[in-house]
Amino acid sequence: MLTYNEVGPGQSRSDINCDGLNTNSPADQKAACLSYCDNSLDAAIDLLFHEPNTATMVARHMIQRLVSSNPSPGYIERVANVFANNGSGTRGDLAAVVRAVLFDAEAREPVADTAQALERGKPREPLLKLIQIWRSLGAVSGDTRSDGYRRWARFANGCNSGSWPQCAYLQRPLGAPTVFNFYEPDYQDPGVNASRAADDKLFTPELQIINEASAVLTANDLYTQICAGWGNNCHSRMTSVPTGNAYFPAAVLDALPGANCGTTCSASQDAQLIDALDVRLFGGTMSGTLGDVNNPASAANTGMKGTLLRFLQLGITGSMGESNPQDARRREILYLLHLVSVSPDFATQR
């Protein structure tokens, strides 16, 4: 441990009493006290930085935030080793640590064991559901402020003043109540699987801010945000750009595979749209398969993919009350995005 001679309340007439310094004190004494404080802080930071457990702690927390709530000991160790040495002898290279987290086999390879697969990934934070959809589908801001600063609607009248992330998602950008985030890293869900979580030491940090009320509020606000600019219930053609919301322009929706067929979309075109959403929103991990595209009701169409195909082919067919066929397809896409956003598949990030 690094140590320094104390400079503080004097034990003899020759010591510097830092607590007694003032603007009229000699400059050399001020410099000595400032140097002592700087050196003490540096020593404390160096001590923590080089503490062996720091690498393990940083590795676990980085993995929890980016990949999985319950990383294996081997995964943590591999990332911790990169924190200790980035391959060039440098300790604490966070860019190398992030690469190690994201490119580790446990983060990227599919798992055949169903029980193990259920423990992979992490609950998706409520606000990140919306951000993922905005970013992946190319939403744009309608804010016309000259400085380009996108500001959420003012929180003037509490949670009754419209959409406000703190109310709908129990989160807001840069609004964590403490420096430790919105939830505890060791939180365990107290629900029906609590005994199993305790036995297996499984953690679900993000579920600390998800409950019966917040789940409904999130689902409702996701609908509001996805339909922004498209009238009540995504029901009308966009006639003016919304200035208080991010929104999906018609050109963005029309650019999706299988999006230009209006009210005459075939099963194969619907399958193309589903595959596009699978890649953009799930990274190719949407559950199920489309084993018989030409027969949507077939049992060969399984999981979420099969459900969405049946929804498009057998559920909401026709014009949906739209006079323009392409507006009907756009409305289908917006509805599909909302269904995806509230689905169990999308609730877990893998």
Image: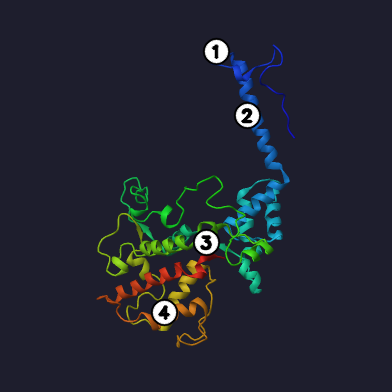
Quadrant containing the N terminus is top right
Q: Where is residue 37? Give x, y as percent.
A: 63, 27
Q: Which residue is mark 2?
A: 38
Q: Amino acid at mark 4?
A: Phe
Q: Residue furthest right?
A: 1
Q: Which residue is mark 1?
A: 24
Dot 3: what SS?
loop
In the rendered view, does 256 fall on the left or right side of 302? left
Which mark identifies residue 311? 4
Which mark identifies residue 115? none
Q: Residues within 10 Å of mark 4 (few under 14, many from 20)?
A: some
Q: Which residue is mark 3?
A: 124
In the rendered view, does 110 fall on the left or right side of 348? right
Q: Residue furthest top?
A: 13
Q: Where is residue 322? Give x, y as percent.
A: 27, 75
Q: CA distance from mark 1 to mark 3?
A: 57 Å
Q: What colour scheme has been applied to the protein in the rendered image?
A: rainbow
Q: CA distance from mark 2 to mark 4?
A: 64 Å
